[in-house]
Image (cartoon, grey):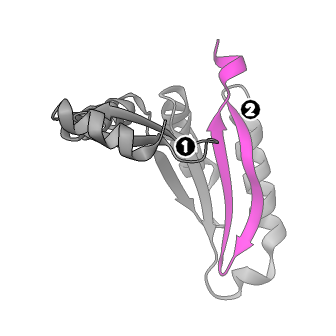
Amino acid sequence: MPIEEARKIARDADLDLVEVAPNANPPVCRVMDFSKFIYEKKKKEREARKSQTKIEIKEIRLRPKTTAHHRSFKVRDARRWLNEGKKVKVRIRFRGREIHYPEIALEDLKEIAEELSDVAVIEQPPSMEGRTMLMVLAPDKVKKK
């Protein structure tokens, strides 16, 4: 229908002519109350935001010289967080000359990943970022069930 005729119909109904699908051929328009349309759209967006799950990332920080006893406390916390559905970032920080021995930290990260392999999967493998080595673990949905 011609645009002028659609505008006349909208004016007679005391409503607005709203273009709903501009990319369609020909473009699709609808006669409606525009303010009500905007309100409904915002309401749907709010509902969609409510239903989204925000994944929280927890972090455990270690050093290459961290003892196995202290590491076990951190791993226990990480296990609890993974069971709650949170991701865990394991960071090993190097100080001084420790940076020359990244294989120690790599071995620690592999041991931690092995200890948590029943509840987690490695989302980001160990990698160096400046003076830290980083690994991200995510909860394993298959093993959890």
Outermost residue, top direction? 145
Compared to residue 65, the image places residue 9 above or below, namely: above
- Give the residue type that dot 2 points to: Ser
x and y percentages locating residue 32 in the rendered image: 27, 32
Q: Nearer the viewer, residue 123 or 10?
A: 10
Residue sitting at x 39%, y 28%: 51
The secondary structure type at the circle numbered 1 is loop
Residue sitting at x 31%, y 42%: 7
- Give the residue type that dot 1 points to: Pro
x and y percentages locating residue 88 in the rendered image: 56, 46
Q: In this figure, which residue is indicated by the disc labeled 1?
A: 27
x and y percentages locating residue 49 in the rendered image: 36, 37
Q: What's the distance in space between the residues labelled 1 and 2, CA to CA?
A: 54 Å
x and y percentages locating residue 114 in the rendered image: 77, 38
Asked whether residue 126 is drawn in magenta, I would say yes
Q: In this figure, which residue is indicated by the disc labeled 2?
A: 117
Instruction: State which region is magenta.
Output: 120-145
User: Which one is in front in this view, the residue at disc 1 or the one at disc 2?
Assistant: 1
Q: How many numbered badges does the structure rendering display?
A: 2
